[in-house]
Amino acid sequence: MSVISIETVDRIAWVTLQRPEKLNALNTEVLKELDCAFAGLEHDEKVGVVVVTGAGEKAFVAGADIGELRELDSASARRQGLAGQAVFNRIEQMPKPVLAMVNGFALGGGCELALACHVRVASETARFGLPEVSLGIIPGYGGTQRLPRLVGKGVALDMILSGDLVGAADALRIGLVSRVFPAAELKAGTEKLARTLLSRGPLALRQALTAVHQGLEMPLEQGLQFEAALFGLLAATEDMKEGMAAFLEKRPAQFKGL
């Protein structure tokens, strides 16, 4: 039985991890299915936005499968870390917006999965954390790199070194998530955001993601030059002409990705 389900409705692909009895913990099978899922969704013309979540109300993803991790030695642990990083890199480099809809615990690998998504929204009951040090290890799927880039070095070190959990309100305060909803309104709120993104120019969304992801790795001046180059490319598109015309004519734009 598949451990991931994909349901596409009106250009939104809902990717749900389906191991509620294990609080949707990550294992090798889950990572492989996630990789295959995103490889397909990247080229699926019927999909404009992807939402990642976990089955049930208790957990988004409660971490990696400890039973599997405890069997690793030094060499296999390194391979496992690199394999998980490759999957999360694919998600982060997705040319379509990816939203993490966090509906409970997002711990360890689950927090790292959320960090790999472009936007994180959460239920008021969500809790985030990287508690790996309590197991004698460190985050291995990108947590030590993505969290400081998102919330700053000091806050990230506090979370990583203490292993303490952060509630939704504090996650919003430090910038770990961008929106928080009451639990009963989480899916509706996430869907509303996804539909807002779908109404924007798809080429512009793709280049905005590229500008931010690649630009952050460049010195500021180089990043500004990169931004200007992408801005110039978009000015030659039909979508740019349509967007400008729609604004002046006070009507919704009808983007075609051209």
Image: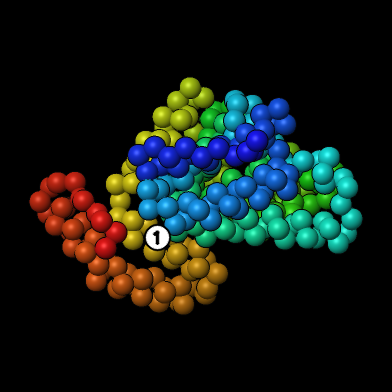
In this view, the residue in front, 223 or 139, is 139
User: In terms of depth relative to the viewer, which is nearer, 98 or 157?
Assistant: 98
User: Which residue corresponds to the image point at 53% horizontal and 52% vertical from the top-left?
Assistant: 38
88 on left or right of 100: right
Q: On the image, which quarter does residue 74 sit in?
A: bottom right
Residue 111 seen in the figure? yes
Residue 207 rendering spot, x and y as whole percentages: 39, 64
Q: Which residue occupies 10% across, 51% down?
A: 249
Q: Residue at x 35, y 39 (%)?
A: 10
Q: Which amino acid does label 1 sit on?
A: Arg
For label 1, count other residues whose C-alpha is less than 10 Å away and answer few (under 14), some (14-19) or many (20+): some
Question: Which residue is drawn at the image coordinates 31% and 72% (left, top)?
Answer: 233
- Front residue of 147/104: it is 104
According to the image, what is the colour scheme of the structure? rainbow
Q: Height in image: 159 above or below 214? A: above
Position of 131 with respect to 54 (left or right) is right
Between 165 and 245, the residue placed more toward the observer is 245
**Up/down of 120 relative to 187, above or below:** below
Q: Can residue 172 be seen in this view?
A: no
Q: How many labels does the image show?
A: 1
Q: Residue furthest front?
A: 1
Quarter of the figure with the C terminus: bottom left
Residue 163, image x and y in percent?
A: 76, 42
Helix, strand or loop under label 1: helix
Residue 35 x/y as whole percent: 60, 53
The answer to whether 150 is drawn above or below residue 110 in the figure is: below
Residue assigned mark 1: 206
Instruction: Tell me if 28 is positioned left or right of 213 in this view.
Output: right
Which quarter of the image is occupied by the N terminus?
top right
